[in-house]
Structures are given as C-alpha cells and as structure tokens.
Image (spheres, rainbow, N blue to C red):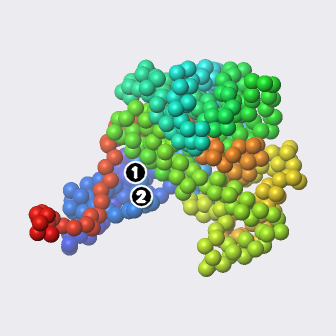
Amino acid sequence: MADGATQKTVTLLVDGKEISLPVMSGSVGPDVIDIRKLYAQTGMFTYDPGFTSTASCSSTITYIDGDKGELLYRGYPIDQLAEKSHYLEVCYLLLYGDLPTAAQLEDFENRVTRHTMLHEQILNFFRGFRRDAHPMAVVCGVVGALSAFYHDSTDITDPWHREVASLRMIAKLPTICAWAYKYSIGQPFVYPRNDLDYATNFLHMCFATPCENYIVDPIFTRAMDRIFTLHADHEQNASTSTVRLAGSSEANPFACIAAGVACLWGPAHGGANEACLRMLREIGTVDRIPEYIDKAKDKNDPFRLMGFGHRVYKNFDPRAKVMKESADEVLGLLGVENNPTLQVAKELEKIALEDPYFIERKLYPNVDFYSGIILDAMGFPTSMFTAIFALSRTVGWIAQWKEMIEDPEGKIGRPRQLFVGAPQRDYIDVEKR
C-alpha cells in the first residue's frame, strides 16, 4: 500500500456492535479479509470446511486463476515454462524466486546430480517391505526414513541444513520412486547415472536392467520432463497444506515431505490419473464409448467421466494443452493400433472436444487425462502414477516449506472447530447405567 493510501476495511455487525476488519490485497487475485483478531473482538470463529474460502498464508510462489485458466510459477506462465524450460530450471525458479543464469543453472544441476545416490543401508530398508507393497507405501516410508540417514541436514534453524535437505530430496526422489517400482516387479535396483539428465536418469532407473543397454527415447524424456514440470507446484492444495502444517510444528524436512506424500496418496488428490486410466479400461473398446457418454450425461447414473474438467479451473486446465502435445508425440512414436485403451482415449478426447454437452459445461480433458495416457504408454503400471506425481511435486512442497519456515509471521497451525457434541455431563457409576 502506498504512503497515505486509505486502508480498506469491511464492517461486521455483531449483536448491534460494528467490528472493523482490515482488507489485505495481493499483487494479483482477490482481496482477503484479515480475521486474525476476530475472536478477540467478537468471541467468534469463522466456519469454513475444507478451507475453500480461507487464505492460510501469504505466498510468492504459485498463482492460479481458475476462471481464466491461468497457472503461474513465480509469475511465469506454465505453458512458457513447459515449452522453453526444463524441470531442473523450474526447480531453481520455484526454490529461489528467479530464473537462473547459465552459470547458476549449471551449478544447480551439478549439485542435484551428485545427490541422486541413496545411502547404501537404505537398500536394507527397501527389503523390509512386502513384495506386493504399493509403491506409494514404499515411497512414503523411505522418504520419512531419510532423516535417520542424513542427520547433517535436519536442523531447520540452519539455512545450510535447509538447503542441503532440499537438494537431497529433489535429487533422491527419482531414485526412491524407481527403486520402489523395481522392488514391486522383482527386478534388481539400477543405480543413478551422473551422465544422464534428470528425466532420462529416472526412466533409465525404471526400465534398464543389468543384462543389456537401455537407451531412453528423447520423446519419452521430453514427455516425462513435462509431466514433472506441469506437476511441480499447484498453490495451497491438500498435500502442500499438509506439508506446511507439518512444518509449522518444526518437524524435520524429510518428515514434512513424507506427510505430503501420504496426503497425495488419497484418490481424491493424487490418484486422479490412475482413476482415469481405470475408466478407459472399463470402457474397453471404441464401440462402447457412446454407451458411456450416455451414462455420463444421465444425471441418475452414478458413472462419471474421469479426467475431464477441474475443481479449480472453470474454463480449461492450462497444463492440459501442453500435456496433449506430449501425449500425441508419445502415441505417435508407439502407435495405438494394438492398444485398445489408447484407442479409447483418443476417440474419447475427440468427442469431448466436439460434443456440445462437454463444450457447454467446459468439461475439457485435463492434465490427469493426458498424463495417465502417457505413463501407461511408457509402460508404467497404474500403481506408479501417484508416486511419479509425488516425485514431481517434491520441489513445490520444499519451496512452500522453506517459505513457511522463513515467514516471520509463521506460527504452528491450529484450526478451530464448531463443536456439536454433548455438553458437559457428570460421570455415572457403571452399576447405575
């Protein structure tokens, strides 16, 4: 606010008494009402299940305008970053606030690359899981256990500890996720390679074996890098808010990110692309699509098309256009002639972009629709989809965690409640009940 400018306020009438609450304005987006003194002034709290109308923090990292279909990382539109940048440069941007110089980027990439190996004793930790453990269970457990192996980066009051922990998690999540996959299919772990870029290294660890050379196709690398970039952060979603809440207790950074992984595991959050692929397989063949379109249009039918529309984006998902390009490239490389699931996906996409029912309701294919198709085409099982999402989102969680730690107004999270249980009552001896 400029010097001499009038502070905007709102007035609340409570039992005939006027209460004035200040209004805060961000650089973009809607104003917010500052209710921090509401209880002191009125003896009341606000009621907002899901916190859908509550700003839990101030942030400079990511901005979403759902009505415009806009997603900005540090002010940069997501489509520009996906087209012109790459994931590690985006990581630098999210962590430090600005795009790096060439020298800064080279230094950052080198530091990340040299942290990709896991402590060798973590191998024993992996082997403690059942063979049929879900990869997300393994990822959540191993990330949480990192604090037991890297004691030199758990002091959250030390900026250097925070820096090292951040780099370690960005570097080691691909190795953890790849090893979780290898463990689930009974193949030997493949160690990271310093001569490969971030996305190629991850794909190599997932699909290579000691038996023969495995060369990652550049189209796969580009598609995977875009998946990482497009999922890197998404403002104060459920898992990010979980990381911030865990961090507000001054928990170590590895524990905070493990909390984010656990929250992301929920099918209502990180499992959308997995649900989308299950739907495509349920439809089965192209000739059954009209039947399922009719079911989707029937208000009395519980069936819902997964991968279309978005809770936040009321127009279109800005990430979907970029992801569609990658999906087309991957499917063009592999072909869809012998894959009924991918044939269904392509035909369903065509219908959704042309059918007035979808157009009028703005039910466009979203990022989960395309990312599920890409990951399936690459050969990943659906159980790995959310783990790859967690890998991608780690940098966003870390950036948000660091911002929260360094916020002078930060305090431990403590939501209030509307209590609707029994009021105080006296204990009755058991023989009298």
Q: Which of the two residues, 242 or 313, is positioned nearer the viewer here?
A: 242
**Residue at horizontal 46 percent and vertical 34 percent from the top:** 144
The residue singled out by tag 1 in the image is: 56
Crowd class of label 2 (few under 14; some 14 to 19; many from 20; radius 10 Å): few
Mark 1: amino acid: Ser
Q: Are marks 2 and 1 in contact (CB under 8 Å)?
A: yes
Q: Is residue 231 above or below residue 6?
A: above
The picture quadrant where one finds residue 384 is: top right
The residue singled out by tag 2 in the image is: 51
**Visible residue check, residue 383:** yes
Which of pointers 2 and 1 indicates the residue nearer the eye? 2
Q: Estimate the x, y position of residue 269 in percent, counting from the top left.
A: 54, 53
**Visible residue check, residue 98:** no
**Residue at horizontal 52 percent and vertical 48 percent from the top:** 264
Q: Estimate the x, y position of residue 126 in percent, counting from the top left.
A: 55, 31
Q: Where the C terminus falls, by quadrant?
A: bottom left
Mark 2: amino acid: Phe
Q: Compare marks 2 and 1 and give the one earlier in the sequence.
A: 2
On residue 304, the disc is none
In the image, is 147 to the left or to the right of 288?
A: left
Dot 1: element: loop
In the image, is 430 to the left or to the right of 229?
A: left
Q: Which of the two residues, 316 or 221, is positioned nearer the viewer here?
A: 221
**Residue at horizontal 73 percent and vertical 48 percent from the top:** 376
Q: Estimate the x, y position of residue 75 in percent, counting from the top left.
A: 58, 44
Crowd class of label 1 (few under 14; some 14 to 19; many from 20; radius 10 Å): few
The picture quadrant where one finds residue 352 is: bottom right
